[in-house]
Image (cartoon, grey):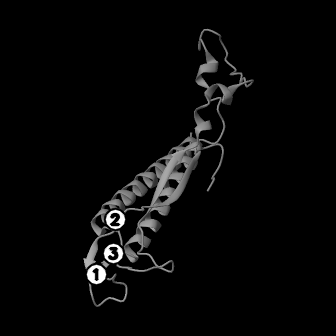
Amino acid sequence: MKIGDNYPGFNISAKGLSIQRQKMNVIAENIANADTIRTENGQPYKRKFLTVEQKPDIFDFPGNISGQTIKLAVTDDAHISNPAALIDQTRGDKTNLQAEEQTDQSKGEIVYMPDSPYADEKGYVEMSNVDIITEMVEMIAASRSYEANLTALNSSKQMAKDSLEI
């Protein structure tokens, strides 16, 4: 979700909100399937998690400013010694993040359930590897991160509004 080029704080906060929403969706799916012994592929449900990485080209500072010069008009050269240093010359996308859903391949708990149709020849069934306590902790962290991004977005919005009132 891109809001506008003039206020990069909006885009950064919006990207953060979007990623935290994706995390909450993955956590909700994990909690809903915590007791699923068999899925359509015949295996117990495996916990999913979201990894977030920044694409490597965002820190290519020399590549971002190559050939770009922005002139700052000043009334007297003595006021600002190096006006080019004050201007953000990297006008590219600063929300260069990618989120990828992955599956935890660790084994779940092995439970003795001889009456289950999914039990092996010894009567044991592999359960899902989802731990509800871990998921709840992850949910609280994602919720707090969402609130922090919302607060940052509201602060950016208030600063933009106040700057228009000057």
Report the residue that reaches farthest toward the top. 78
Which numbered disc, 2 or 3, marks the residue closer to the eye?
A: 3
Report the residue that reaches farthest toward the right. 67
Which mark is first along the chain, 1 or 2? 1
Query: Which residue position holds label 2?
Result: 135
> Which amino acid, mark 3?
Met
Q: Vertical placement of 138 versus 36: above or below?
A: above
Q: Is the C-beta separation of discs 2 and 3 under 8 Å?
A: no
Q: Is the C-beta separation of discs 1 and 3 under 8 Å?
A: no
Residue displayed at 44% across by 72% down: 29
> Which amino acid, mark 2?
Glu
Which mark is first along the chain, 3 or 2? 3
Q: Picture coordinates of residue 166 (x, y %)?
A: 56, 39
The residues bearing labels 2 and 3 have C-alpha atoms spaced at a distance of 16 Å
Q: Picture coordinates of residue 121 (x, y %)?
A: 32, 83
Residue 102 tag number? none
Q: Secondary structure at mark 1?
A: loop
Report the residue that reaches farthest toward the left. 112
The residues bearing labels 2 and 1 have C-alpha atoms spaced at a distance of 31 Å
Query: Which residue position holds label 1?
Result: 122
Residue displayed at 37% across by 84% down: 118
Q: Secondary structure at mark 2?
A: helix
Residue displayed at 42% across by 80% down: 38
Query: Which residue position holds label 3?
Result: 127
Q: Vertical placement of 62 versus 123: above or below?
A: above
Q: Nearer the viewer, residue 113 or 20?
A: 113
The quarter of the rendered structure image containing the N terminus is bottom right
